[in-house]
């Protein structure tokens, strides 16, 4: 996945969360929990404040950017043909996850302890996770290594319908900002419903045949307008 345009704190969090996963092994038959693997996400574990979606709002919180990592992990699992046990889409479309030509709906949000991403190693061998963060080119890469059992995965192009334009921009007075200063804290996004089909085969055998649905709400741009004299 790509994260061009991320603030420095978000890039830091992406790198830190990715580091927790690099070199991990998933045992045969294991259901792997993303949240359990990366551990606590807070200032005490080294995470910085960056923007996250929390209670249907975009706010600064420890660990903003971790969902870039879970989204990339989700895509690697799909490409590897491993069963997805638990996955939830974001409340609204996030531009980072559509960089590089990816359509909407190929994302996975996490927010411990309520929202997790889980996959299962249904092969007979261990799977090794290896990761790379290229901060210069804003590219995050996940690679899964295991023993091939002949399975092949295919992901169809997402279908899109029921598009809804974003609401009008909202301006809110903020007495903490100097008068005349304007700061954007939320970004407009068109709402839509989307789905993509995922199929995993081994010869003539169908191992997985699933449709992933996402329902993204329309989102308005929000600006803080300084009133401090």
Image (tube, helix red, strand yellow):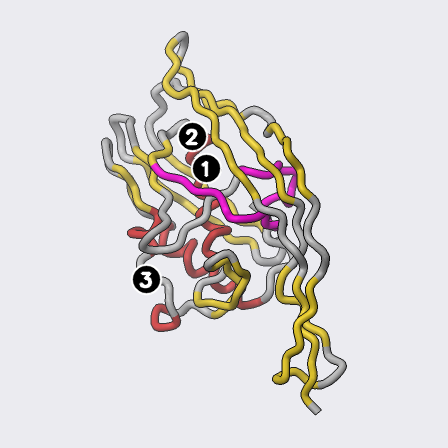
Quadrant housing the N terminus: top right
Going from N to C along the chain, the mark reached first, 3 or 1, is 3
Q: Position of residue 156 (x, y in %)?
A: 56, 24
Q: CA distance from mark 2 to mark 3?
A: 27 Å
Q: Is residue 72 visible?
A: no
Q: Position of residue 12 (x, y in %)?
A: 50, 64
Provide the residue span drawn in magenta. Answer: 86-105
Q: Position of residue 100 (x, y in %)?
A: 65, 42
Residue 145 lies in what quarter of the image?
top left
Q: CA distance from mark 1 to mark 2?
A: 6 Å
Q: Are marks 1 and 2 in contact (CB under 8 Å)?
A: yes
Relative to 80, is 39 above or below?
Answer: below
Residue 222 is left or right of residue 14, and the answer is right
Q: Is residue 102 magenta?
A: yes
Give the numbered dot on residue 80.
2
Q: Is residue 82 visible?
A: yes
Residue 34 is left or right of residue 59, and the answer is left
Q: Is residue 52 magenta?
A: no
Q: Of discs 3 and 1, which sits in the foreground?
A: 3
Residue drawn where x is 46% and y is 21% of the image: 199
Residue drawn where x is 33% and y is 27% of the image: 147
Within 10 Å of the Cα at label 2, are there few (<14), some (14-19), or many (20+) other Cα atoms?
A: some
Residue drawn where x is 40% and y is 20% of the image: 151
Give the numbered dot on residue 76.
1
Disc 3 designates what residue? 40
Residue drawn where x is 51% and y is 24% of the image: 197
């Amino acid at each position: 996945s790509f994260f061009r345009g991320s603030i420095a704190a978000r890039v830091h969090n992406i790198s830190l969360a990715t580091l927790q996963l690099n070199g991990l092994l998933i045992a045969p038959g294991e259901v792997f929990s993303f949240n359990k693997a990366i551990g606590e996400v807070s200032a005490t574990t080294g995470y910085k404040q960056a923007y996250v979606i929390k209670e249907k709002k975009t706010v600064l919180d420890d660990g903003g950017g971790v969902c870039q990592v879970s989204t990339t992990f989700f895509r690697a699992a799909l490409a590897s043909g491993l069963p997805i046990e638990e996955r939830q889409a974001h409340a609204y479309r996030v531009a980072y996850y559509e960089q590089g030509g990816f359509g909407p709906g190929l994302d996975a949000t996490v927010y411990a302890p309520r929202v997790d991403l889980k996959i299962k190693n249904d092969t007979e061998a261990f799977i090794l996770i290896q990761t790379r963060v290229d901060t210069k080119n804003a590219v995050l890469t996940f690679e899964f290594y295991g023993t091939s059992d002949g399975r092949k995965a295919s992901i169809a192009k997402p279908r899109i319908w029921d598009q809804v334009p974003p609401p009008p921009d909202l301006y809110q007075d903020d007495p903490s900002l100097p008068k005349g200063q304007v700061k954007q804290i939320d970004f407009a996004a068109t709402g839509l419903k989307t789905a993509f089909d995922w199929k995993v085969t081994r010869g003539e055998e169908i191992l997985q045949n699933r449709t992933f649905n996402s329902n993204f709400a329309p989102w308005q741009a929000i600006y803080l307008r300084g009133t401090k004299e």
